[in-house]
Structures are given as C-alpha cells and as structure tokens.
Image: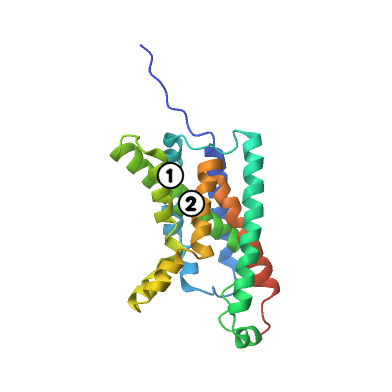
Amino acid sequence: MTTRRRRLPPSLPLFVGLCTVVIAIKLLFAFYPGDFPIKQQAEAFGWPMIAMLIAIGLAGLFADRALGLPEPLTDRRREWRGVIWSVLTGFAYGVVTVIIDVIRQPRHVLSTGAAWDHVAWPWSVPFYLFGAIFLEFLLRLGALCILFWFVHVVVLRRRWRTVVFWIVAALVALYEIMPFIQRDIAEKHWDRVALSLLQPLYLSNVFEGWLLWRFGWLMPIVFRVAFYLVWHVLYGGLARPSA
C-alpha cells in the first residue's frame, strides 16, 4: 500500500520571495525620515503585523492549492496574458483615479498641500510596493482564499464552486469601502451606501477577484502595483504641491 505525499505549492518560492521583499522594506523604513500621511500606515510596518500578514498569506497559499486555483508561474502563456490584463487595467484604474481626484480636489488643497495623502518620492516606491503586497496577501491570497476554502470545501463539500467564489469575492471586496459605508449608514445616506457598490474602488477589488480566479494569486498584486505606480508614485509624487 502506497501513501500519497502532498506536494508543496510550486509557487511557495515566489511567496517566500515576496515575504523577503516585505521584510527588507520594513528594515529599510527604519531609516525613513518623514511622517506617514495616515497613522495606520505606520502600524503596518510593525513586526507583529508583518508576522500576522505572513501567517495569513501562508494559510491562504495552502487554501489556494487545495482549491485548485491557477498556480502562478506554471503556465507561461497564461502568465503573460495575466500580466497584460493586470498591468493595463491597473494603469487604467490609476488614470481614472487621478482624474477623479483632480476633479474633486479643492483648489486650496492643490495650492497649499493640505491633506496630501501620498508618501513623497523616492520613499513612495518601496512604501507602495510594500502596500500592494500587504493588501493582496491580506485580502485576496488571505481572506478570499481562506474563506472560499472554508465555505466551499468544509461547509458545502465542494458544491457550488463558482457561486461561492463570487459571493466571497464580493464580500472581501467591501474591505476598502467599508469606512465610507459605515459613515453613510451613520448619517443615514442610504443612497450613497447603494452607490458605493458602483464606485471604481469597489469594482476594482471585485475585478482583482477575477484576476485571482483566472490567472492565480500573483496577478492581483501585479494589478495593485501598476495602480499604485500611477496613483501614488507618479501622481502622488510629481503632482505633490510645494509647501
């Protein structure tokens, strides 16, 4: 009688490499001379947070493997299609976000530099690379894959795979817009709550779920890196008002 040995995910070296990048950037920011635009951003660089992030990502990696989702770096043609989709749509979403911000931004903010929520160049490059990996480990590789595995495999015994995935993906996509939803509920702006589901921020998170479903867990990270390059690094750095 032979026993089947479980193989490690082929993308495990990729995961380890990205974790190494996260740790290297955390060490680099020990020398950061400035303040973070948002207080919570500094908290993401704490060792407990990084350890928790890696643990969540690792659990998601094995859930991803058990679910049979596309494995990164195992199909060259699929990988190139994924990169093209992720980079082009990430750039497009960045351009849309910049246009919306320019339209909505009060003139006094542009002239005085108040409320400029971007890290300045050149620190913006490692900071937003860290942020892209951080969020996608937490949301797509972590929350989406783990919850999808739990509901689909444990609860439903592998039934209704596609339906379960998209329900979980839609719920996980609420993470970034939840503060706005909570504010609108508190102010009883129910129309805004409904409209928030049509905003680019929410739709882009749902789209990242599709990237994971179609191309594997690496492509949402590529998408977010491309988006941050336009929104935070180029616009956030080049368009930064002078003090």
Q: Which image quadrant for residue 242?
A: bottom right
User: Where, quadrant-wise, is the N terminus in this rendering?
Assistant: top left
User: Where, quadrant-wise, is the C terminus in this rendering?
Assistant: bottom right
Which amino acid does the dot numbered 1 rest on?
Gly
Camera-side residue of 83 and 32? 83
Q: How many marks?
A: 2
- How far apart marks 1 and 2 lie (CA) works out to 8 Å
- Identity of the residue drawn at 35% across and 40% down: 152
Camera-side residue of 201 and 108? 201
**Left or right: 109 as drawn, with respect to 147:** right
Q: Find residue 117 and report its horizontal and vertical position in percent.
A: 56, 74
Which amino acid does the dot numbered 2 rest on?
Phe
Q: Which image quadrant for residue 237?
A: bottom right
From this view, report whether residue 215 is shown above or below residue 190: above
Tell me if residue 123 can be seen: no
Q: Find residue 220 and report its horizontal and vertical position in percent.
A: 55, 50
Crowd rating for badge 2 (residues with CA inside 10 Å; few <14, some 14–19, many 20+):
many
- Identity of the residue drawn at 34% across and 77% down: 188
Give the residue at mark 2.
Answer: 137
Give the residue at mark 1.
Answer: 60
Q: Dot 1 lies on which element?
A: helix
Q: How is the image coloured?
A: rainbow
- Label 1 close to label 2 by CB (< 8 Å): yes
